[in-house]
Image: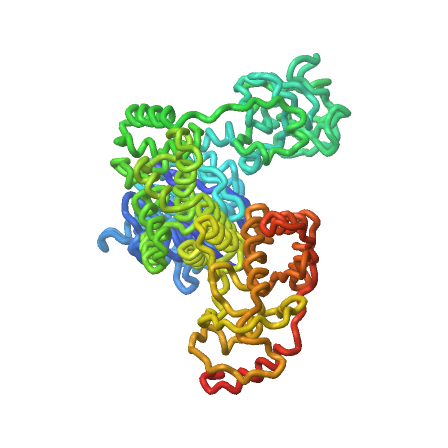
């Protein structure tokens, strides 16, 4: 059989995600009731349609959600035996069987008689389904399916309704038929015996998920997983502590065990089937004291549940012993010890994720740490494996797989196996199998981000999305490229060992010249935040698009990365001696400074009265303080207005148009203080210092009066170390001792009056 199944179907409260690839003529699906076995068959037969995925039967695609392929059930050449038989109630046995016949009409009578005899239905051909027993109905369904000689037959628990003797007879007949049958068979069952008897390959299904798939006898001998061992009938398992290459201590059973199989460092459990345990008279290696806790009698064997004082609480060991006869007493010839043969001990769980191993086991284990292998070594080994398996693997593709494996040989072999579906495993084949965009397209995306070209970045992402690329994977590749660019900046002599690979040195150097370290860190922080939202949210595409918009303009929003970007821009301007109004508040209309008017110096006030909307002038701008005193509020109907307004009526108590000279110097002093302490402040405090509506200051003699909006901001600024930095910077810049006084910034009642005055302007339109 060449059956490839990789499907997903979601229901309310249940999700089916089945994936396996069979290469033999008889395959089984073993699982408990409700695990999704019958639903898998119905999807393969075409009765149910998966939400997404692909089904290929003998090289012919019968379902592909991406290519919009979904053949009808009658077009798939599949025979299906339903669990409830699905016989036509108004048809006789003979007519029901004839429904499945697809051959020559001249031979149908002879063919029907043959199948009536083969399935022991002689004399029942004129009866209706309601007149048959459950076993007889099932035999009619089997005959109806087989008479059509389908290419593939799907059996949904075909022997579940039969009595013991008839089941054995029909199972024997089924085996003989399958030996002669040229097609393939897929059987669903919850019987371990049926799976072992009829299936060369077996998939273990649990709660709608493929647990493991492999050779049937290999899975029974070494299930590898704890759940797999239980599904195949193994009742005995224990946590282990590794004592050596062939020595473990069974923590639950309280016994040291010698093993034939080598004990790897990541093995956590040992198991043995109860039928392999042997009775012995003397204690020794692999022996445990026999004490019967419970006894269960079956038809042909005695079953003992063993517990003793050396075992952990709740632990037990099942032992199965054949009966000599039906009257054989179970107390007869009980041994003092049980022997666990090393050749039948099996390790059922292996993991490379040490953090998931319980601490109770870790505390008792020897830990052996293994170094990651260099990607060049793994790539060379992959090329050797490919040559031995006659696979066409290019050197570039081997290098990509080696980098994706992240130093693990086993992971590299798994990735190589995933790519083996392609006849020629080149770079494009690896990108396609792994769902990667490729270095060229990711570099193009980063180039658009650096240039601030939001439209081009979104268009590039949409093209990748339409190609079936996963948004989380794309952001991961983008983050990997930015990491390499950062490594190029901070460790230029580190060499290729610090890089993920795939990008030329010239390309990385070009990106490194276009982005600062701060910008790279903020961008990587943004990408990681978007990736976390994808894991928790329902719309990964939207999360990725919002991330790209933020990357193209890193000053958007009030997030920490956005604040960092604005602070970085401010620091760069201060460093270059270009200090002016910062465009960090897009909602505030720009302030146009009028030509200064020289008038006689007015009487000096104690300090300027600043409101929530007042801001001190910034060095480099010849701004009138009176302009700040009547700055427009941040109401929605005034945002973005740049139209020149006539001079409002001057109130008698208003200050002159020209600002006092000392006030201007005081404003410059505060701006210089902010610039001096900016790199010493926490990131969140830096963001408030560049926002004049949150923090402002005035000079009153030898006192620097810093006004801060009450609440959270005041709590962040009101710290001894921050106040001391203000004081030191003011003393250094002014050349005199200055004391810092922190006060709350309170709005003044005149702001409301100012708003009413603004409403008198005809140029202002209210929406």
Compared to 764, does 508 lie above or below? Answer: above
Specify the color scheme.
rainbow
Q: Nearer the viewer, residue 664 or 373?
A: 664
Point 40% across, 53% down: residue:
43
Q: Please tell me whether residue 553 is drawn above or below residue 514 in the rendered image.
A: below
| In-image side of 81 versus 598 (left or right) | left
Q: How far across and down, in percent of the image, does residue 731 sit?
A: 63, 49
- Name the quadrant containing residue 381: top left
User: Which quadrant does the N terminus fall into?
Assistant: top left
For residue 603, side relative to residue 33 (left or right) = right
Number of on-image labels: 0
Residue 158 % position (x, y): 46, 46
Q: Quarter of the image holding residue 485?
A: top left
Q: Does residue 118 appear to the left or right of 333 in the view shown?
A: left
Q: Nearer the viewer, residue 604 or 709?
A: 604
Q: Which is nearer the eye, 298 or 292?
A: 292
In x, y percent, where is residue 105? 23, 55
Q: Which residue sits furthest front?
A: 600
Q: Is residue 243 visible?
A: yes
Find residue 548 and report its horizontal and vertical position in percent. Answer: 41, 55
Q: Is residue 73 visible?
A: no
Task: Residue at 46% x, 34% y: name it.
Answer: 197
């Amino acid at each position: 059989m060449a059956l490839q199944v990789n499907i997903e179907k979601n229901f309310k409260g249940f999700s089916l995600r089945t994936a396996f690839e069979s290469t033999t003529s008889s395959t089984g699906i073993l699982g408990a009731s409700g695990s999704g076995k019958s639903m898998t068959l119905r999807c393969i037969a075409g009765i149910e349609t998966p939400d997404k995925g692909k089904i290929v039967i003998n090289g012919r695609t019968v379902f592909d959600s991406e290519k919009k392929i979904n053949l009808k059930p009658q077009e798939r050449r599949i025979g299906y035996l339903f669990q409830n038989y699905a016989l036509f109630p108004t048809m006789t046995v003979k007519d029901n069987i004839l429904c499945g016949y697809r051959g020559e009409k001249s031979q149908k009578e002879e063919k029907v008689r043959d199948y009536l005899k083969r399935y022991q239905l002689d004399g029942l051909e004129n009866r209706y389904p309601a007149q048959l027993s459950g076993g007889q109905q099932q035999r009619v369904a089997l005959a109806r399916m087989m008479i059509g000689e389908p290419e593939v037959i799907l059996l949904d628990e075909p022997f579940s309704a039969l009595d013991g003797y008839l089941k054995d007879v029909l199972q024997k007949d089924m085996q003989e038929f399958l030996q002669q049958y040229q097609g393939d068979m897929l059987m669903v069952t919850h019987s371990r015996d049926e799976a072992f008897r009829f299936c060369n390959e077996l998939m273990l299904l649990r709660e709608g998920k493929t647990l493991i798939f492999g050779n049937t006898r290999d899975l029974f001998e070494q299930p590898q997983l704890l759940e797999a061992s239980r599904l195949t009938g193994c009742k005995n398992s224990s946590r282990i502590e590794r004592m050596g290459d062939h020595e473990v201590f069974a923590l639950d059973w309280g016994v040291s065990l010698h093993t034939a199989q080598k004990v790897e460092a990541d093995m956590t459990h040992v198991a043995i089937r109860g039928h392999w345990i042997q009775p012995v008279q003397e204690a020794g290696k692999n022996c445990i004291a026999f004490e019967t806790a419970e006894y269960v009698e079956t038809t042909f064997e005695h079953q003992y549940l063993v517990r003793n004082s050396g075992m952990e609480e709740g632990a037990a060991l099942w032992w199965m012993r054949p009966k000599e006869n039906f009257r054989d007493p179970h107390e007869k010839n009980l041994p003092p010890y049980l022997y666990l043969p090393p050749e039948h001990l099996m390790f059922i769980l292996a993991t490379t994720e040490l953090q998931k191993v319980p601490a109770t086991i870790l505390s008792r284990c020897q830990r052996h740490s293994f170094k990651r292998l260099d990607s060049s070594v793994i790539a060379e080994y992959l090329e050797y494996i490919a040559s031995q398996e006659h696979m066409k693997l290019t050197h570039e593709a081997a290098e990509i797989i080696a980098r994706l494996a992240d130093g693990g040989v086993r992971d590299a072999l798994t990735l190589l196996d995933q790519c083996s579906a392609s006849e020629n495993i080149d770079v494009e084949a690896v990108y396609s199998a792994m769902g990667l965009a490729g270095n060229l397209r990711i570099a193009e995306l980063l180039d658009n981000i650096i240039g601030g070209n939001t439209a081009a970045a979104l268009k590039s992402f949409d093209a990748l999305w339409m190609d079936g690329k996963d948004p989380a994977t794309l952001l991961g590749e983008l983050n990997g490229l930015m990491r390499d660019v950062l490594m190029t900046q901070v460790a230029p002599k580190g060499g290729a060992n610090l890089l993920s690979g795939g990008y030329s040195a010239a390309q990385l150097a070009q990106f490194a010249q276009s982005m600062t370290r701060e910008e790279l860190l903020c961008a990587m922080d943004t990408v990681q935040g978007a990736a976390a939202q994808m894991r928790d949210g329902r719309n990964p595409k939207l999360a990725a698009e919002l991330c790209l918009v933020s990357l193209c303009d890193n000053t958007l929003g009030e997030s920490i990365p956005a604040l960092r970007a604005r602070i970085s821009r401010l620091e760069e301007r201060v460093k270059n001696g270009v200090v002016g109004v910062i465009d960090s508040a897009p909602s505030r209309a720009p302030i146009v400074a009028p030509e200064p008017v020289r008038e006689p110096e007015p009487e000096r006030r104690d300090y300027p009265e600043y409101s929530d909307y007042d801001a001190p002038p910034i060095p480099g701008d010849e701004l009138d303080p009176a302009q700040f005193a009547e700055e427009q509020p941040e109401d929605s109907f005034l945002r973005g207005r740049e139209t020149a307004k006539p001079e409002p009526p001057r109130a008698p108590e208003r200050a002159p148009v020209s600002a006092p000279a000392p006030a201007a110097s005081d404003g410059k002093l505060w701006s210089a203080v902010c610039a001096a302490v900016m790199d010493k402040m926490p990131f969140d405090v830096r963001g408030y210092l560049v926002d004049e509506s949150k923090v402002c200051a005035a000079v009153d003699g030898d006192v620097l009066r810093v006004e801060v909006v009450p609440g959270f901001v005041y709590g962040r600024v009101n710290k001894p170390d921050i106040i001391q930095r203000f004081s030191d910077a003011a003393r250094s810049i002014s050349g005199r001792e200055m004391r810092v006084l922190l006060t709350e910034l309170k709005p003044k009642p005149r702001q409301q009056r100012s708003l009413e005055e603004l409403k008198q302007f005809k140029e202002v339109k209210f929406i």
